[in-house]
Amino acid sequence: MSFEKKIIADLEKIVGKENTSGEIFDRIGYGQDAANPDLDPEKIPIAVVKPTTTEAVSGVLKYANNNKIPVYVHGAGTAFKGSPKPKRPGSILLSTHELNTIESHEEDMYFELGSGVNIYELEKVLTSKGYFLPMCIGSKFASTIGGAVSINTIGHMVDICVGKIIDYVMGVEAVLPNGEIVDTGTKSIRRPAGLDMTRYFVGGEGLFGVITKLRLRVAPEQKKGYVVGFFPELNDVAHAFQKYYQKKMPPPLYGEVIDKVAAQAPFELRGLGIPKGHMALAINVSHSQREADELAEETVRIFKSENAVDAYVVTDPKEQRDLWDARDNILNILQASDGEDRLVQAGAVESSMPLSHLDDVFDYMLTGHDYQELKEANLFIYGHIGTCDLHGMWVVPVSMPPEKRLKIAKAAIKLESDINIKWGCASGEVGQTASRIAFFKKRYGMAAHKMMMDMKMAVDPNNILNPGNLEGEGYEQS
């Protein structure tokens, strides 16, 4: 029996034959993520396992640790920075897809969730019971709660309105790299003071263990006021949100921008006509509808004071869906056209900035940099302007040679790093490891990176869990 076949046979004994695959289709499919579909043939995992219990996850990690086999954790493969992708040969791919239980503990104000629970399905459950999900992930139709928790992301919501997901995760059940099972946190709405082991896993990007379950605190749904505005210049949008905060308005739940060029495709798809300018969206929230409406009207006044050609409260449910779907699904829509001239993403950035420099970053992203490769592609700007976190996406015809697209992608990564370092920030949506380690070292210093490496090795001395992510392996370090 070959080495690979022996590993597959051993794994079948741990998680069951029906939950183990050595088929090439599964091994390649689960070895990819949204950042870059290309997978080095030498890094294709030996097997894919889909444990159905925490004990089965423990068994896989004990086996891998004893035999020094790398293990990569895969939720739904929607990560943008390369974390789930195998970096080393001869690995096991552990999918959390089957860890999908949902248990209600409303009497104690939380739900216990398997890490493989689909975010969209969870959102529907919570909404039906009068709660809101404290995240709005662009990939929610596919992504898992465990992946979002591991990154500590709330997606398209505003941090200073709802907090980060760590503020809602009361505790987790996790499996350490050696297979030991730990339970963290509390079952009380009073979070632990001082040391709270939950924080090693929420936002830990899978470095210290595999989350199998989590306790998510529930919060009641709030009343909302929806606002749209159209502006002649992107800097007008920046100035509108700067004024919003300067006037000490309560932070919006949602503050988004999509430039007028990018907006054309979703507007056409939704039958909305031609965008009147660069579109800004805001959702004001309160426990009373009257106050939410008053905040929305004040937001309209602020938008109009900063040169909006049109701004109004959106009361029609269909128009709300059309406008917000135009923004939330922008990435998919922009790449959904057919034919030889179909546009594909060549490079993308996620950059954060201080509130006072929103307009500076628009200028820098458009014309202020020296990366000629980026100027040869079409730039779309969109993102979370209400939380000072913006995306730039450079798209090119699918006919562009791959090597030229690769140069654009590398230039985009460098520009992203430039912006975050220039203004002293770090991107707040899709994590900091794998392809961002070069930036992490520049932004926080080698001592900070060594501290993280030491912490990782203390928990995982054989470095079997997601190895290469904290080292930045497989990505150009410059």
Image: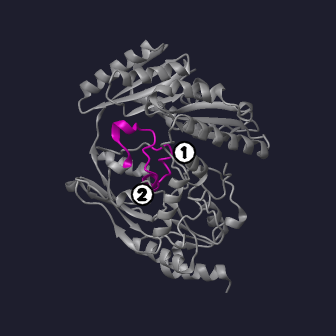
Residue 117 bears which disc, if any? 2
Report the residue at 43% width, 57% height from top.
146
Could you tell me the amino acid type at mark 1? Arg
Q: Nearer the viewer, residue 106 or 159?
A: 159
Q: Residues within 10 Å of mark 1 (few under 14, many from 20)?
A: some
Residue 446: % across, % down: 56, 53
Q: Residue furthest bottom?
A: 1
Residue 403 colored in magenta in the image: no
Q: Which residues are magenta?
A: 137-165
Report the residue at 48% width, 78% height from top.
62
Q: Quadrant of residue 274?
A: top right
Could you tell me the amino acid type at mark 2? Val
Q: Which residue is mark 1?
A: 443
Q: Where is the N terminus found, in terms of image quarters?
A: bottom right
> Which mark lies nearer to you, 2 or 1?
1
Tell which circle, 2 or 1, labels the residue nearer the N-terminal end: 2
Residue 189: % across, % down: 23, 53
Q: Nearer the viewer, residue 403 or 46?
A: 403
Residue 212: % across, % down: 41, 65
